[in-house]
Amino acid sequence: MQRVPSYISRSVAGSYDNEAVAIFALIFTFYLYIKTLNTGSLFYATLNAIAYFYMVCSWGGYTFIINLIPMHVLLCIVTGRYSSRLYIAYAPLVVLGTLLASLVPVVGFNAVMTSEHFASFLVFIIIHVVALVYYIKGILSPKMFKVAVTFVVSIGVVVCGAVLAVLIALVASSPTKGWSGRSLSLLDPTYASKYIPIIASVSEHQPPTWPSYFMDINVLAFLVPAGIIACFSPLSDASSFVILYIVTSVYFSGVMVRLMLVLAPAACIMSGIALSAAFDVFTRSIKFQLPGATENSERDAGETSSNSVVAQNDVAKTEKNEDAVKERPSKKNRKKEKEKENVEKPSVKSQIKKKLLILPLEASIIAIFLLVLLGAFYVVHCVWAAAEAYSAPSIVLTSHSHDGLHVFDDFREAYAWLSHNTEVDDKVASWWDYGYQTTAMANRTVIVDNNTWNNTHIATVGTAMSSPEKAAWEIFNSLDVKYVLVVFGGLVGYPSDDINKFLWMVRIGGGVFPHIKEPDYLRDGQYRIDSQATPTMLNCLMYKLSYYRFVETDGKAFDRVRRTEIGKKYFKLTHFEEVFTTHHWMVRIYKLKPPKNRIRGRAKKSKSKASSTTGTKRIGTKKKNPWH
Amino acid sequence: MRSASEHDKVEGFPVHFALNLVLVSSESRSKVLLAMARSTSKDAQALLHSFRSAYAATPTNLKIIDLYVGFAVFTALIQIAYIAIVGSFPFNAFLSGLLSCIGTAVLAVCLRIQVNRENKEFKDLPPERAFADFVLCNLVLHLVIMNFLG
């Protein structure tokens, strides 16, 4: 599983996000749960709860566990697989798990108050009821049990109805029915785009495309169905759990491409099951059909007839017939063979449950070879994916052209400039994508970074980027910002620059500050920066900071990403001054101009009053914003 | 009765007969109900009796565990009554108290399951091991609760 690209995607060059740890915790918790289910030991139940605590500490995705396990318990109860081991596996986990989850500050009391956890409590109650029913059934005689059932059902229905009514009233009173935004966006994929633009804007939260499935889990994609079928042949508690896990993770990964991560371990497990079953069959076929050991194989067949070997191919049958023909001349062998057949037939009939498949020798050898080849391709693909797709440090970009390899090192250039040419306390404002990079490489404070936990703050920056210069200057001044950084790809054709991300700035800003209205920036429903652009768009800070002096590059100001000439080509910046632009114009840094000392209106007044001096400073005047 | 006499005036004998029938049927209905009630109470009594006799057959150590479970649940109920009366201000304290009661009850039930000699699945499990697991789990539970009690 460590090869699967989806798991590798969460860690780059040795540094890792919390999901790399979380997936290990997830699998560990599931493993311990299955172990407890199989052994029924309370010790493993305790370990299970501790592993669950580890999972809660590492990732918000722990709600997946606390909903999947109750679902599985319910499934087991409904399919009649209730056993006391199930109770031991589940009940302590709920109590200890809820307590441990409330210990984590992020979760706190949400562990008992939000709808995400209600499933576990509901199934907790259900499993107690079922346990009690089984216990009473064990003690009483069948007649008495029936009486008890009628008694309890009549009372219980009334009580349950009352409790349910209260619960429903409580839950329905809250607007989101108690679910948090993140969970709702998973259950209803369109929720985020309607209500929470910042969640919708993250590229990892978009639904995945079909090729990305193949890219991320490669060969496993078609081994998984084989594994599901293999799981059904001895359907135990554990295999039903794995099936449930993979079905739910496939659904959730279809909603958010980031959750392919949760699918990956399930896919690995399923494929492992499928492959091991396949290898089992093939190696067994080879073992039984090794050439030059016909007598051995007979004996083996005789011995294993108690395991009811059933040949399913005509080829195998003809092999046996050949053996029979060979043996016919000798009476002793004929007897043995008859006995063998007789022994085989009843054993076949008696043990139809354990049918072992034997395929012809050549077919199984080729099949094993092909499977190994498949594994080799998988490894090659994973290594390639890890190297090319998931390790590319997006801070240094490369492009291959006819005259060799071009390296675009603009980001590091800009960060180096920042770290050398600004004061240590200066604050830099940019869009949140570059937050971590700026903090790490330029060693300067940023306003918003990739953590994106403060939506209002990000909305403030977004509003500033979408406002005209004066308003933007005021916002940035109130945040004590000295430098503004924009990423611009128009000169070289770098597609993920800030103008392309601009729609999210407008949406997120508009979500918090209602004076930013998205239709102001749209012409015919599209964001345009050419001559057809709206005046709001042409006056907003992002446009001006991106295209300032752009016309000097080629005279026509042709934007290579949007593939059009820009609308407003010649303009001056009044509140910002350009301090640095990188080699390929990819990163542009601007400084906020300090407010003017002289207030023009006042100076004129003083001129008319006192006819001699010009430019006198009025010290005792009321402090007014100079830009008004 | 007034209507009956009026009907008597109007229709005479059949109505009287019908009325008698109604009376009789209501009587019988009430009789039937009474009989049902009696049978249910009899059933309930028989049920309780059989339950009691079956329970008396359980070994003493299991009965002790059951007593312990009952005590834990009783403590939980007291806490719920308290929060209903006084309110749940230090919510973490309430939560930890309640969950500790429920937790010990659950763990005791698990112990009972594992120690019960009639339980086929746990034939090979020595009761000392089951008790050791029980103690370990309780230790972890109470550690967490002490932490959470605040």
Image (tube, coloured by chain):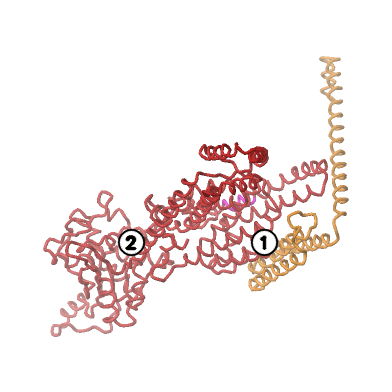
- Region in magenta: A166-172
Q: Position of residue A82 (x, y in %)?
A: 68, 50
Residue at 85 percent of width and 20 percent of height: B5
Residue A192: name its quadrant: bottom left
| Residue under pointer 2 | A505
**Does residue A167 show up magenta in the picture?**
yes
Residue at 36 percent of width and 70 percent of height: A435
Secondary-structure class at tag 1: helix
Disc 1 is attached to a residue of which chain? A
Vertical relation: A624 (above or below) A162: below
Vertical relation: A226 (above or below) B66: above
Vertical relation: A160 (above or below) A615: above
Q: Position of residue A166 (x, y in %)?
A: 64, 51
| Residue under pointer 1 | A92
Chain A: colour as depicted: red
N-terminal of the pair, mark 1 or mark 2, is 1
Q: Amino acid at mark 2?
A: Met
Query: Closer to us: mark 1 or mark 2?
Result: 1
Chain B: colour as depicted: orange
